[in-house]
């Protein structure tokens, strides 16, 4: 079934390989299978440069698949090198299932919520400088918080407890000021 879907998508096999049902399945698993998977059907190799690579027996890929396939292979390679358990099928499965269940507009035709929480659509295209500046300011605050947390974790226990006491006192002062303003 997997081989049929790959061929139906538009992958063309080199002459003499049309009857090999393992080849299209091996290509699909190589591009989009789990990073931990080692064995491909038909004894094909996961090494793209190997003579036994299923990619070497492909005549052509549809244009839509070329960049997607490269991105998938790069993601899997990074995950494998860093020894991170990563399954592209699990990550993309839900979205792919939703797209096959109900017809949908492409992303550029939909209303989407941007990073600032504002709705963007075809009629509201322009991104204002203040939105970018506000987003950058928020990013800076979060980055500063993370850096501070890393630094505090590395402090000796005595300094850390003193610093945390100062932070708690400052927060209590702010809360009192807010209560008095109301």
Image: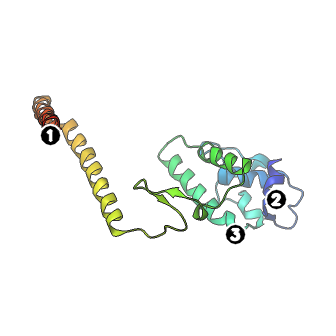
The color scheme shown is: rainbow
Asked whether 151 or 77 is in front, the reply is 151
The percent position of residue 116, horizontal first and vertical second, equals 39, 56
Please name the residue that numbered disc 2 is placed on. Answer: 7
Q: Is residue 167 in view from this perspective?
A: yes
Locate residue 151: give its quadrant: top left
Marks 3 and 1 sit apart, C-alpha to C-alpha, by 62 Å
Instruction: Check disc 1: other Cα within 10 Å, few if <14, some if 14-19, many if 20+.
Output: few
Please name the residue that numbered disc 3 is placed on. Answer: 63
Q: Quadrant of the C terminus?
A: top left
Asked whether 17 or 106 is in front, the reply is 106
Q: Secondary structure at mark 1?
A: helix
Please name the residue that numbered disc 1 is placed on. Answer: 181
Marks 1 and 2 sit apart, C-alpha to C-alpha, by 69 Å
Indicate left or right for 17 with 163 as reference.
right
User: Please, is residue 77 above or below residue 49 in the view?
Assistant: above
**Earlier sequence position, callout 3 versus callout 1:** 3
**Earlier sequence position, callout 3 versus callout 2:** 2
**Earlier sequence position, callout 1 versus callout 2:** 2
The percent position of residue 38, horizontal first and vertical second, equals 65, 44
Q: Secondary structure at mark 2?
A: helix
Q: Is residue 89 in view from this perspective?
A: no
């Amino acid at each position: 079934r997997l081989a049929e879907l790959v061929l139906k998508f538009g992958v063309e096999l080199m002459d003499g390989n049309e009857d090999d049902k393992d080849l299209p399945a091996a290509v699909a698993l190589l591009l989009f299978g789990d990073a931990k998977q080692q064995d491909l059907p038909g004894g094909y190799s996961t090494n793209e440069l190997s003579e036994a690579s299923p990619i070497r027996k492909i005549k052509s890929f549809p244009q839509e698949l070329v960049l997607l396939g490269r991105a998938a292979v790069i993601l899997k390679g990074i995950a494998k090198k860093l020894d991170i358990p990563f399954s592209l099928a699990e990550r993309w499965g839900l979205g792919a299932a939703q797209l096959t269940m109900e017809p949908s507009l492409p992303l550029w035709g939909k209303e989407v919520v941007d990073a600032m929480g504002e709705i963007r659509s075809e009629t509201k295209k322009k991104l204002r400088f203040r939105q970018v500046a506000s987003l950058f300011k928020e990013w800076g605050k979060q980055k500063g918080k993370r850096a501070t947390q890393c630094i505090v974790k590395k402090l000796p226990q005595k300094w850390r407890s003193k610093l945390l006491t100062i932070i708690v006192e400052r927060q209590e002062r702010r809360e009192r000021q807010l209560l008095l303003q109301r």
